[in-house]
Image (cartoon, rainbow, N blue to C red):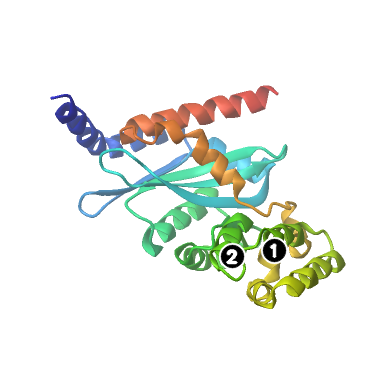
Amino acid sequence: MVLKTLSSDHKSLFAQIRKYGNILVEMNPGSMAKVHVNPMFERFFLCFHAMQIGFLKGCKPLIGLDGCHLSSEFGGVLLSAIAIDANGGIFPLAYCVYESENIDSWSWFLELLHRALKWNNDRHLCFMSDRQKEVLKAIKNEWPKAGNRYCLRHISTNFNANSKCSSLDINWKLWKAAKEGNEVGFKQVMERIKGVSVEAYQLLMNIPIDIWARHRFDTRIKSDHVTNNISECFNRWIKDDRDKPILTLMGIIRRKVMVRFSEKWVL
């Protein structure tokens, strides 16, 4: 009986998601909330006005993109766009609940993010992601002038999956090469990797250097992050709430963001 009641609650809250979005926009002018149905609920996008203004006026032009799976009865994925504030802390920018990770859902999310920010394409911007093909295609379609970075932890994981490259020594050198601040130091470390494994060296050099090595990052972005830890921090922040019904989850995230912004403002 309890499980049946909980299931009913989950379904009824999905039916109220459009009303919830309209109330948020009405009570918080300038915010953007969008619902996509086909014909049943598929996606919900939310970006508060404070997020838009805060990013445009006080954040570095680097956005981390990542998704985490929801463990409620109906599943789904929560996609987030996380920026970095002037103090180096995480700055939630927008989030979206959607059916599954594919090119269509990523494009929908990034298109709405572009509209919410009223972004001028002539401004410099860079996205950090886990090198998923769907994400890269969506970025290219919706933000054609934006740069890309690949999370080094993801590169390292894939790198270690190759039996000929799975060496602690090579892995340590990979991280050292990525964090080098100049080309001379980078080349020296890469030569050491080549001395251990030519295949490992070639695999790394086949990945464009400017999207994973610090010394080649666009200096206009003002950030030397080589991992997507900002997105991982957000996912851990809401880890205990991923099993909640959709409106409950949205309310929890909203309150968390409000408290964080308020504390940052006071400090």
Sequence-wise, the earlier of marks 2 and 1 is 2
Residue labelled with disc 1: 170
Question: Residue at coordinates 50% horizontally, 28% vertically from top-left?
Answer: 256
Q: Position of residue 266 (x, y in %)?
A: 67, 22
Confirm or deny contact between disc 2 and disc 1 (CB under 8 A): yes
Instruction: Give the answer, above or below, for where 206 lies relative to 181.
Output: below
Secondary structure state at the residue bearing disc 2? helix
Q: Position of residue 98 (x, y in %)?
A: 35, 49
Q: Position of residue 38 (x, y in %)?
A: 23, 55
Instruction: Give the answer, above or below, for where 6 lies relative to 56.
Output: above
Of badges 2 and 1, the one in the foreground is 1
Secondary structure state at the residue bearing disc 1? helix
User: In the rendered view, does 56 fall on the left or right side of 67?
Assistant: right
Q: Which mark is residue 93?
A: none
The quadrant in which the N terminus is found is top left
Q: Which of the pair 67/189 is nearer the observer?
A: 189
Residue labelled with disc 2: 159
Q: Which of the pair 87/196 is nearer the observer?
A: 196
Question: Residue at coordinates 38% horizontally, 33% vertically from top-left?
Answer: 249
Instruction: Give the answer, above or below, for where 124 lies relative to 72.
Output: below
Q: Which of the pair 96/144 is nearer the observer?
A: 96
Q: Position of residue 210 (x, y in %)?
A: 70, 67
Instruction: Give the answer, above or below, for where 33 lies relative to 27.
Output: below
- Would you identify the image quadrant in which residue 145 lies? bottom right
Q: Is residue 170 visible?
A: yes
Q: CA distance from mark 2 to mark 1?
A: 10 Å
Q: Amino acid at mark 2?
A: Phe
